[in-house]
């Protein structure tokens, strides 16, 4: 069994996050985000990553793009390449140019998708063993699967999202290691649930409380799991599986539908037994 060890991530400092003034998912609370508290929460997450020996690259947020803080949505890093996201909603489209500039400046070769395809980065896509899980339904379209398969040279398993509260795959779907995945069944179609049961040896259901507590938006590294604090049943499950829970409060970011995974674009990682 293999587990992920994260070496380097890219994050975006939430200087303008509290300016959020639109709603494109059921979690969003325009005008309710506390700037000082969100900065404190974000800095606590950065400090936690550094304590876990993760190098953190930081991009400053630009005005008028409050959701720019969710760096995992911006694109998928694969080696020295970046597959840049193509956002569905107009409110998020301007985020891409700032990330594209950063990746180009830092030596990444940027690839783009055809104009008719939508994909919102690692919010929708997980590499898992020799497969790619791809979430479709609310933000990414099913037809992007072929392009993803060609680009990465891997088989793509399409997971159909049916609940708008779980608009991205990473809201209710959490691969812990090469053997175990947590997921919230009601978020996905019956066909997709059946696929997962056939593929994943140890498929564990989130309770409703865990799912709506943002446990699916956790980050695993080197037998540690960074997750939204207050989810005690999830904490116990992780300990039973041999992992150390590292809770962190990211409640201000939940007000826009994001958590630890959303705030974290993984640049470098290894897999160890």
Image: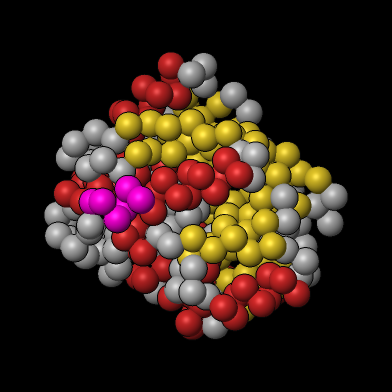
Q: Position of residue 74 (x, y in %)?
A: 41, 40
Report the residue at 48% width, 55% height from top.
260
Q: What's the magenta bit mostly, secondary-structure-wise?
A: helix
Q: Is residue 117 visible?
A: no
Report the residue at 52% width, 35% height from top.
56
Quadrant location, the N terminus: bottom right
Depth check: 183 or 249 in front?
249
Depth check: 143 or 22 in front?
22
Q: Which residues are magenta?
A: 35-40
Q: Is residue 229 left or right of residue 241?
A: left
Q: Position of residue 29 (x, y in %)?
A: 21, 65
Report the residue at 30% width, 68% height from top.
27
Q: Is residue 86 left or right of residue 247?
A: left
Tell me how many marks there are.
0
**Residue 38 is covered by the magenta coloring:** yes
Give the color scheme: rainbow, by chain, secondary structure or one colour: secondary structure
Q: Is residue 8 left or right of residue 129?
A: left
């Amino acid at each position: 069994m293999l587990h992920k060890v994260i070496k380097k991530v890219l994050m975006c400092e939430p200087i303008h996050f509290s300016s959020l003034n639109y709603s494109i998912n059921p979690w969003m609370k325009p005008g309710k985000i506390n700037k000082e508290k969100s900065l404190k929460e974000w800095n606590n997450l950065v400090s936690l990553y550094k304590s876990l020996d993760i190098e953190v690259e930081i991009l400053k947020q630009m005005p008028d793009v409050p959701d720019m803080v969710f760096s995992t949505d911006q694109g998928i890093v694969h080696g020295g390449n970046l597959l840049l996201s193509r956002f569905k909603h107009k409110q998020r489209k301007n985020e891409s140019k700032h990330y594209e500039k950063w990746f180009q400046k830092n030596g990444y070769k940027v690839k783009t998708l055809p104009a008719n395809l939508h994909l919102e980065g690692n919010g929708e896509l997980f590499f898992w063993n020799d497969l790619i899980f791809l979430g479709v339904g609310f933000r990414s379209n099913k037809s992007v699967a072929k392009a993803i398969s060609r680009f990465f040279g891997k088989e793509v398993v399409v997971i159909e999202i049916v609940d708008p509260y779980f608009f991205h795959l990473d809201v209710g779907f959490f691969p812990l290691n090469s053997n175990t995945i947590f997921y919230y069944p009601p978020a996905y179609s019956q066909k997709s649930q059946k696929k997962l049961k056939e593929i994943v040896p140890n498929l564990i259901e989130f309770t409703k409380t865990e799912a709506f507590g943002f446990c699916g938006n956790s980050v695993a590294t080197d037998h540690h799991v960074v997750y939204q604090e207050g989810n005690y049943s999830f904490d116990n499950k992780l300990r039973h599986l041999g992992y150390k829970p590292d809770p962190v409060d990211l409640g201000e970011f939940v007000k826009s539908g994001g958590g630890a995974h959303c705030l974290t674009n993984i640049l470098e990682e290894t897999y160890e037994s």
